Amino acid sequence: MKPGDTKAVEEMFNTISSKYDLFNDIFSFGMHRIWKKKLLYFLNPKFGEKWIDLCCGTGDMSILLAKYMESSKNITGLDSALQALSIARERSEGKYSSIKWINADALDTNLPSEEFDGLLMAYGLRNLSSFSLGFREALRILKPGGRAGFLDFRSFESFTLEGLFQKLYLSIFVVPVASLFGLGKEYSYIKKSLTNFPSGSKQIHLALSVGFKTAEYKSIANGQMGILLVTA
Ligand SMILES: C[S@@+](CC[C@H](N)C(=O)[O-])C[C@H]1O[C@@H](n2cnc3c(N)ncnc32)[C@H](O)[C@@H]1O
């Protein structure tokens, strides 16, 4: 599967949705929760603010957001994969049932402009067919002064030990383990999706070029992950 093929990406995430959370725990040794909490810590969403989790998948980040804000009101989770969303809806029943789940494309959400105080995206950006269109749509739905954070893998253009570790981690650990569950092809997509994915200063440049007022990039997880923080 080629990165940027929106329909194929949607089908792939529908296929892996039932194993997605289990695999996240296995492949990150549970650390993905710490990285997601770090994103929340940097953004510091406040009670009463209106937030959206783009590319919410099975709802992990939206629920962490609700826990952080001590309220699930004013939170929207949006994803293009229906099956991932139905898991999200099930998971949020009860305590987090006020979270609104929307099936839509993050590049063209159909949501009103200047609607949200804050926006986040965890491991979604890399999957979009256009990073700049993704940033543009995020900027459009944020209120002026609104803040956003994008958490994803880092990519490495030239040889570094961190890049070597990532390559080995994906090819020796992630893909073989996923293959045991018949999902090797789907998980080999992670490596492909990183080929043209900008990191660090390139993400900053892209975000500023679409109109975000400020942008900074923080490397976390021993340089394996990155968080882009922007203000509208
Ligand atoms: C790697 S998962 C991340 C899920 C969740 N944010 C998390 O961190 O656990 C990427 C998600 O992005 C969604 N996605 C990819 N392209 C999208 C698009 N154009 N619009 C909306 N969702 C998209 C996929 O369906 C998938 O659920």
Image: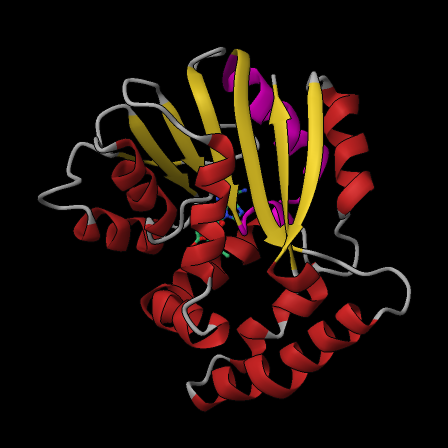
Find residue 93 and report its horizontal and vertical position in percent. 13, 46
Indicate whether 206 appears above or below 30.
above
Q: Residue 190 vs residue 96: left or right?
A: right
Question: What are the residue bounds of the magenta stretch?
Answer: 123-143
Quarter of the image that includes the N terminus: bottom right
Q: Is the magenta stretch mostly helix, strand or loop?
A: helix
Q: Which colour scheme is used?
A: secondary structure
Please give the count of numbered marks on the rendered protein.
Answer: 0
Q: Does the magenta stretch include residue 64?
A: no
User: Which residue is at 44% across, 18% downward?
Assistant: 117
Q: Residue 23 vs residue 196: left or right?
A: left
> Which image quarter: residue 77?
top left
Find residue 130 and report its horizontal and vertical position in percent. 69, 39
Residue 2 visible here: no
Residue 222 visible here: yes
Find residue 171 and report its horizontal and vertical position in percent. 67, 83
Quarter of the image that includes the C terminus: top right
Q: Outermost residue toward the left?
A: 94
